């Protein structure tokens, strides 16, 4: 940003100075005076077309690098689920500990926020960290950051979402790792770990009747699926990320796993956002389970 | 209403007037392409996201009626082109006859459309009114099927509206043609309405396969 | 002043409301767009007053949200987009090309009536509960959750779109078929090139917003699911469709103003514009490339990184033609004979403010930086610098430049210069602090804000009061001058365009004899008819005088 500011400041000042200088230097002296007829100059035109173009490309490149890095969260992140709704934020730590309009994170770790909306489009923004991301209903969006300094930092909703859009903010508290652990365990565990809640739902909603772990059911085994490569019926391959898991629950016929029939009913309208997040958390927790030789939802190891 | 063939005040020559009218109609048709284009884009995107349900919904609309309508509309474009030709060779009576035929065929199209809409109403496929795609189907299927039908009615409805406007223009043209106004020197209104009519036909030629012909076995 | 001209050729309200004279239609538009400017300006004033305190105690949150929404809708659709094309474009384009009127005068009048009907729907929306979705109407907030008068507003904007489309159609056909003998494409004034480029955007872009709003309106009325995820739709699809028009729309708002500046600077420097073909080509380039950058409004929606990279790159490309223009305007001043009259002050003000607005766009096009600045006051400052500092300055400057032609009168020069400076100062005081606010993280569309942002908000509101004065002054003295201003001759500046060869005010049919053009544009050095010291010869005829 400093680079861009410098370039822009340079051109802004330079052109302003030149304009003002010409304005005074060439002020009309006699009423009938005309200016010198200069129609143009190809060299100048070329210069001031090419130079701004090259400068623009450098600005583009610098920003692109930052952005691409921002959109690809590293693998070893502390995942926190954040739900936005009119007009508050609910977040849930991996242990299940919930917060409203607050977010506690440890310093020095990569933190990934998985964002979901219960109603309209919101945006979770932490200006001091220079990060924000839209929170779109019907989609998952993720954002990541690495806090470097303990303290309390404002977060805001940055996408107009109705009456109390301006009041939909809160505080990110960055703590030393030991303080963070203490805070996590110190609170009451009346909140259920999302993985545990997800496991319960997995049985209640009869997912378990088809998705047998040994791959012998009517549906692929979910062991080891998360972040693995899935071979689809149409020959393509897809990575089973958070969005894939969510889509598989809400629009199961969008992508059929190779070797299986399109039998799964959609759970659209039957699960709340919290329940979908819980199921997703549970399926993610099966990542370390042994993948069966046949009937797996994911390509066998070696193909990864 | 100016007597046809007279030079309007802002123009210098009849040629300039004719050229302007023609260019004006072409520019207008470009805006119509973009207008329908937005909906075509929406439809295409949604179809690629929900191919099975869109396929199923598409199979439930009446292919026979749609096909008949396609032939009817292409036929009406033929008769429209014939009336333009007739004006160019100075056969004034033929102009009127072909215009009337075009109007008839256009009305047949609208009538058949009405029958199709009625069919959809009876089957509870009209979003916003009484929509229920398949009794007992889950919320997801219903929602996506409703999306198909919303687009179906929006796109064919907008098209039908353009046809009705075209029919109105044809009625006006027939009246003028009956008075013998169109001849070799002056046939601008016929040419322009012809352009408009052909455009509306082309929109249908895209609509028909997109809506009726996906996933037919 | 000529005895009979377009203003007094016929009398009575019917002769105005049923006119097909492009000049009278331009004045009809002048009145209506000024009306909407007042409405939008009133909302803006209330917003700035409300934001004096962090708690925001002037109005309720619901009302505040309606204020910024209605400010945007009124200003963008009913003031900025029509302003220069419908007022100055309508008035001048036929005269600039040597024609008696536009190609389709009745359609021109129809455009105005369609504008009025659209305006009525929107006013109805404002009056029956207002609109609180933001002018961007993002779904599902607008189509499902909002409890305000969304439907009439959406209908009104939909209808108004056809006014734009017909105006654009009229301009394109006119420029193609109605040029006088000898008026080749490269002899056209740059004002005409600018409006031609703008008209391309009118006809290609406006239909898309029309269909988008139609679908959103249907969704709201019939509970359909195009953009509602609960019903299988996609809110991001709405954004793509919306911005596909609304980004080119900003070029609709700025290109005509650039056209005005391209007329003013050569006139008051008394030399040809530097790089005519580059300025003409840049206008077309901006219109074309401008259609390919829309998703730079969506970098943070979760769209694919590849899409974001493409749109960021293209957004930098679209900045280049504007840079070329700025360099060309500046170079036109070199070795000119510059007078400091009011239109020139607006011209220079435009260059300075557009420069800042455009350069700050580079920040936003930069993906990494946009993460921080998206949806903050930085964005608001950026677009106001271009819309107000650029487009409105161009409009007001153009009004002053062609005022003698339109009314046959001169406005009071001293007062006009004062107003121009007031406007410039007030504008900067209002909007520069907002760049800082945005950088510090203050989000936009906030009815109340954390206390640390108050200082800059107060500065901004103080500036706004000066800005308001800068707008009120011209409204007063321009109106005053219509009756009491000094009589202007046909070409008071003088300027080189064909329009200045007509009387002030012009005859209804503009020219009594169709002109034949055999001179290049802005060719001060060879125009012996302007009464200037051309090639050392003394003037042979007085430069000013009555016809």
Image (cartoon, rainbow, N blue to C red):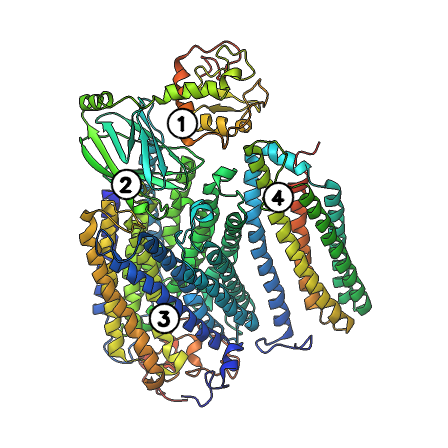
Estimate the spatial distance between the alpha carbons at disc 1 and disc 3, rounded to whole Å: 58 Å
Element type at marker 2?
A: loop
Q: Against C19, is A75 above or below?
A: above
Front position in the image: C204 or B178? B178
Estimate the spatial distance between the alpha carbons at disc 4 and disc 2, rounded to whole Å: 42 Å
Host chain of mark 2 = A
Element type at marker 4?
A: loop
Q: Same chain, marks 3 and 2? A: no
Element type at marker 1?
A: helix
Q: Which mark is residue B130?
A: 4
Q: To which quarter of the image does residue C105 belong?
A: bottom right
Estimate the spatial distance between the alpha carbons at disc 1 and disc 2, rounded to whole Å: 22 Å
Q: Which mark is residue A169?
A: 2
Residue C261 visible (yes or no)? no
Foreground disc of the pair 4, 2:
4
Estimate the spatial distance between the alpha carbons at disc 1 and disc 4, rounded to whole Å: 34 Å
Q: Residue at x 21, y 30 (%)?
A: A174
Residue C370 visible (yes or no)? yes
Host chain of mark 3 = C
Q: Which mark is residue C398?
A: 3
Q: Residue at x 58, y 40 (%)?
A: B146
Q: Contact (CB < 8 A) between labels 1 and 2?
A: no
Estimate the spatial distance between the alpha carbons at disc 3 and disc 2, rounded to whole Å: 45 Å
**Label 1 sits on residue:** A277
Front position in the image: C505 or C143? C143
| Horizontal and vertical percent position of residue C477 | 30, 78
Host chain of mark 1 = A
Estimate the spatial distance between the alpha carbons at disc 4 and disc 3, rounded to whole Å: 56 Å
Q: Which mark is residue C487?
A: none
Foreground disc of the pair 3, 2:
2
| Horizontal and vertical percent position of residue C364 | 32, 46
């Amino acid at each position: 940003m400093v680079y861009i500011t410098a370039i822009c400041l340079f051109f802004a000042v330079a052109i302003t100075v030149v304009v003002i200088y010409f304005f005074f230097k060439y002020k009309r002296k006699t009423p009938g005076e005309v200016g010198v007829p200069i129609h143009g100059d190809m060299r100048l035109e070329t210069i001031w077309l090419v130079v701004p173009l090259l400068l623009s490309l450098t600005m583009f490149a610098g920003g692109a690098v930052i952005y691409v890095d921002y959109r690809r969260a590293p693998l070893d992140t502390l995942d926190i689920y954040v739900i936005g709704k009119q007009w508050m934020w609910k977040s849930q730590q991996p242990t299940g500990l919930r917060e409203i309009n607050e977010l506690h994170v440890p310093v020095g770790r990569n933190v990934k926020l998985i964002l979901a909306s219960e109603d309209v489009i919101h945006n979770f923004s932490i200006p001091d960290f220079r990060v924000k991301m839209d929170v779109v209903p019907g989609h998952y969006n993720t954002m990541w950051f690495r806090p470097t300094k303990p303290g309390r930092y404002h977060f805001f909703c940055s996408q107009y979402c109705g009456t109390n859009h301006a009041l939909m903010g809160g505080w990110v508290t960055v703590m030393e790792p030991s303080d963070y652990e203490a805070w996590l365990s110190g609170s009451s565990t009346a909140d259920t770990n999302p993985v545990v809640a997800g496991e319960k739902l997995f049985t209640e909603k009869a997912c378990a009747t088809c998705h047998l772990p040994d791959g012998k059911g009517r549906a692929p085994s979910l062991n080891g699926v998360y972040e693995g490569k899935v071979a689809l019926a149409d020959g393509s391959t897809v990575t089973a990320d958070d969005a894939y898991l969510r889509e598989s629950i809400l629009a199961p016929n969008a992508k059929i796993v190779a070797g299986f029939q399109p039998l799964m009913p959609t759970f659209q309208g039957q699960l709340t956002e919290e329940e979908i997040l819980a199921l997703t958390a549970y399926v993610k927790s099966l990542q370390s389970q042994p993948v069966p030789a046949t009937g797996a939802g994911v390509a066998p190891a070696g193909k990864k | 209403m100016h007597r046809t063939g007279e030079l309007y005040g802002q123009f210098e020559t009849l040629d300039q007037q004719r050229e302007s009218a023609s260019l004006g109609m072409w520019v207008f048709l470009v805006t119509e392409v973009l207008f329908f284009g937005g909906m075509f884009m929406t439809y295409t995107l949604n179809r690629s996201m929900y191919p099975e349900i869109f396929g199923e919904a598409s199979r439930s609309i009446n292919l026979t009626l749609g096909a008949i309508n396609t032939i009817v509309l292409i036929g009406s474009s033929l008769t429209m082109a014939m009336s333009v030709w007739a004006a160019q060779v100075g056969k004034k009576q033929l102009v009127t006859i072909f215009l009337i035929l075009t109007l008839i065929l256009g009305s047949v199209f609208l009538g058949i459309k009405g029958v199709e809409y009625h069919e959809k109403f009876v089957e509870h496929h009209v979003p916003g009114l009484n929509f229920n795609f398949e009794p007992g189907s889950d919320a997801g299927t219903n929602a996506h099927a409703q999306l198909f039908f919303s687009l179906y009615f929006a796109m064919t409805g907008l098209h039908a509206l353009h046809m009705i406007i075209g029919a109105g223009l044809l009625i006006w043209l027939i009246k003028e043609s009956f008075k013998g106004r169109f001849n070799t020197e002056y046939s601008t209104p016929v040419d322009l309405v012809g352009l408009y009519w052909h455009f509306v036909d082309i929109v249908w030629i895209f609509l028909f396969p997109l809506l009726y012909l996906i996933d037919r076995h | 002043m000529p005895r009979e001209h377009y203003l007094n050729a016929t009398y009575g309200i019917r002769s105005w409301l049923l006119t097909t004279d492009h000049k009278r239609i331009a004045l009809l538009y002048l009145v209506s767009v000024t009306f909407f400017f007042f409405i939008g300006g009133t909302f803006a004033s209330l917003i700035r007053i409300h934001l004096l305190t962090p708690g925001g105690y002037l109005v309720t949150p619901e009302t505040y949200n309606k204020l910024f929404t209605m400010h945007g809708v009124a200003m963008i659709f009913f003031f900025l987009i029509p302003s220069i094309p419908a007022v100055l474009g309508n008035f001048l384009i036929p005269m600039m090309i040597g024609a008696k009127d536009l190609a389709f005068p009745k359609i021109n009048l129809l455009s105005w009536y369609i504008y009025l009907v659209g305006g009525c729907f929107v006013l109805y929306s404002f009056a029956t509960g207002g609109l609180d979705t933001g002018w961007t109407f993002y779904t599902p907030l607008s189509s499902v959750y909002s409890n305000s008068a969304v439907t009439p507003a959406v209908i009104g904007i939909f209808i108004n779109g056809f006014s734009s489309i017909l105006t654009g159609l009229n301009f394109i056909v006119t420029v193609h078929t109605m040029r006088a003998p000898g008026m080749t494409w490269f002899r056209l004034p740059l004002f005409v090139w600018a409006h031609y480029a703008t008209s391309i955007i009118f006809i290609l872009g406006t239909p898309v917003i029309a269909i988008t709003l139609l679908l959103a309106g249907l969704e709201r009325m019939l509970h359909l699911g195009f953009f509602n995820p609960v019903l299988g739709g996609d809110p991001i699809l709405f954004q793509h469709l919306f911005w596909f028009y609304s980004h080119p729309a900003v070029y609709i708002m700025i290109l005509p103003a650039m056209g005005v500046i391209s007329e003013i600077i050569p006139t008051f420097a008394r030399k040809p514009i530097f790089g005519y073909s580059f300025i003409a080509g840049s206008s077309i380039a901006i219109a074309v490339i401008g259609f390919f950058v829309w998703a730079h409004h969506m970098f943070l929606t979760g769209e694919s990184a590849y899409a974001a990279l493409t749109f960021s790159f293209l957004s930098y490309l679209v900045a280049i033609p504007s840079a070329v223009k700025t360099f060309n305007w500046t170079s036109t001043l070199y070795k000119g004979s510059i007078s400091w009259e009011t239109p020139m002050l607006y011209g220079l003000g435009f260059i300075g403010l557009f420069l800042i607005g455009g350069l700050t766009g580079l920040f936003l096009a930069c993906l990494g930086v946009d993460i921080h600045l998206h949806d903050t006051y930085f964005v608001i400052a950026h677009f106001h610098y271009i819309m107000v500092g650029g487009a409105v300055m161009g409009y007001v400057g153009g009004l002053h430049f062609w005022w003698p032609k339109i009314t046959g009168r001169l406005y009071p020069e001293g007062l006009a210069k004062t107003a121009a400076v007031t406007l410039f100062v007030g504008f900067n005081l209002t909007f520069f602090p907002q760049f800082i606010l945005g950088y510090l993280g203050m989000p936009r569309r906030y009815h109340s804000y954390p206390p640390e942002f108050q200082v800059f908000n107060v500065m901004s509101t103080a500036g706004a009061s000066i800005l308001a004065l800068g707008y009120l002054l011209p409204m007063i003295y321009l109106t005053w001058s219509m009756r009491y201003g000094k009589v202007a001759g046909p070409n008071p500046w003088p300027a080189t365009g064909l329009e200045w060869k007509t009387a002030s005010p012009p005859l209804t049919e503009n020219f009594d004899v169709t002109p034949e053009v055999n001179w290049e544009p802005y060719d001060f050095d060879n125009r012996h008819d302007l009464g200037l010291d051309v090639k050392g010869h003394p003037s042979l005829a007085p430069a000013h005088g009555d016809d």
